Structures are given as C-alpha cells and as structure tokens.
Amino acid sequence: MRIVVPAFVSDSRGNRLKEYTLKKLAKEVTPDRWLYLCGPQEAARQIGMLGTCAPEELTDEQKEKWTHKFHLTESDKAELRPLCEVLEEVLSLTAKGDVDFAIAFDWYKAPDGGDPRHWPNTPSGELVYRSKYYSEGAARSEARRELVEKFSDLIAKHPILRACHNVMTVPGRKADGQSFGERLADKVAAKTGKPLIRTESPGGTRPQAKEGAAIIADGHFESPGRIAGDVIILDDVYRSGATMHAVARAAKRAGARRVFGLAAVRTMRN
C-alpha cells in the first residue's frame, strides 16, 4: 500500500505559505496559467478573494506536492505574485467568526526548548516588547517608528489590505482609548492615508487576557457610526482572536462589507 506524505501540515494557530508556482501548458499558446500553492487554507482564501482566478481540483499526483490549484488568464496575473510573496513572509491566522481573514508578521516568541518563559522574542516580537515596555527614550521611539513602517509597508504590498477603506482600533482592557494598540492603529492609519474608526467600549473594562477571558459579550464594542466598505482591524498582539472577532462583529453590524485582522505578532498560546 502506497503511503502518501501530506504536502503541508497545518498549525491550527497560524501558517506561512510554504511554496507557490505559476505554470502553463507546454507548447500551448494561450493566456491560461495555473497557480499552485503549498500552504494553509487561510492563504488560499486570500488568493481567492482577489476574484481573478478560480479554484480547481488537484490530481492525486499533484496532491503530493501542492495543496491548492487556481486557474487564471494572462490578465489576472498582476496582483498574484506580490500577494503570494507576502503570504510567504507573514503568518495567515485561523480567523474566527466575523473576521474574513487575519494575518500577523510573526510569532511573539521563538521556541528554543527549555522553559517557554525564557524563549527569545522574534524580531517582530522584540519590536512590540520595546515599543510597549521600554521606558521613554530613543530605543522605544525607534521601535515604535519601525513598527508603524512595518505595518504600512505590509498594507502597501498586500493588494486586499491596500484597497481597504478604513482602519479600526481594538479597545484596550481599560477602555480608555489610550492603549498601545489603539495609538498604533492611529499612526498606521495616518501613515497609509486611511480614515481611522475609533471603536467604542460601552461594555466597559474587561479582565486581562491572561486571566482567561476568552469570550466577549455581544455588544461589548460598538462602531461610532455607519461603516462603508472594507475595514482593517489593527492591533499589536493576537492571542485567542476573541477581541478581534468582537470588534469585527461590531464593524459588520455597522455596515462593513468585509473585515480583515492585522496584528504585529501571534502568541504561541491562545
């Protein structure tokens, strides 16, 4: 009996696109091309959202190397390669509920064995750490500047995020509008030229994430007004996704068409 090794083993928390290629039929002079992906469903979903290619079934032989296949024409190629390159760099997360997709630059920590409390930060995790926990000074200011540049650059490269109409904040635990994530979203919105929607918190304060608050009541967050078009919900750290989902629910209740989550880092644990 032949044993087939999966082309890709998905991590339920988040994954990068492992590989992609564009192919055409040999000796055929047509605009037809096929995009092959080896990676998570979350990455393939973003490709499909471009609306310029159609999914097709893989043959058994193709399944040994690839996880997804799309058919396209010559006119469809402009945004595909840049998006695939982005998806090789970032983590496509397992989005929940009203979040249409969510991505993060990287994990917060880089596992190296031993006690997880002593794992080193990834480069993106270090930027978040310095931005939030360093005392006032050049190091913190530089980390914050780099983080804003990193978000802005990703939005510019990702065709779906680039076309989004608004950036929306994720209220902090204190619900005072002054959390690091909210101030970060404000700066990124200004840098990218997108209007900022400041999410309101009629539900008030909430427990710290480490205290196990995994469910946020419906109506805890609200949009200050009606929303038209697509929205980027921007935050510094993605844990369980419960907060981002609750904000996305408020955005769609206010009229948002699609909601995309964007975080600097994903924690190793929910």
Image: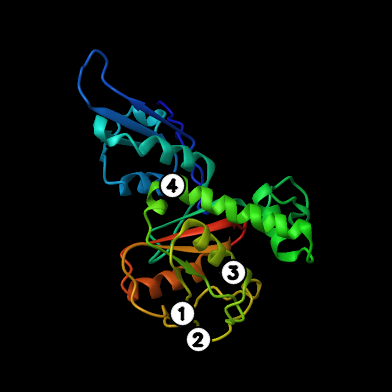
2 and 3 marks in contact (CB < 8 Å): no
The residue singled out by tag 1 in the image is: 221
Q: Quadrant of the N terminus?
A: top left
* Mark closest to the chain's N terminus, 1 or 4: 4
Which amino acid lies under the numbered mark 1 shown in the image of this protein? Phe
Q: Secondary structure at mark 1?
A: loop
Q: How far apart, in angstroms, are the residues tagged by discs 2 and 3?
A: 20 Å
| Residue drawn at point x = 74 percent, y = 60 percent | 140
Along the viewing direction, whichever of 7 and 203 lies nearer the viewer:
203
Left or right, 54 with respect to 94, comes to left
Along the viewing direction, whichever of 157 and 8 lies nearer the viewer:
157
The residue singled out by tag 2 in the image is: 203
Which amino acid lies under the numbered mark 3 shown in the image of this protein? Arg
Q: How far apart, in angstroms, are the residues tagged by discs 4 and 3?
A: 22 Å
**Residue 80 at x, y percent in the picture:** 36, 37
Along the viewing direction, whichever of 1 and 10 lies nearer the viewer:
10
| Residue drawn at point x = 62 percent, y = 58 percent | 267
* Mark closest to the chain's N terminus, 2 or 4: 4
**Looking at the image, how many numbered discs can be counted on the residues?**
4
The residue singled out by tag 3 in the image is: 183
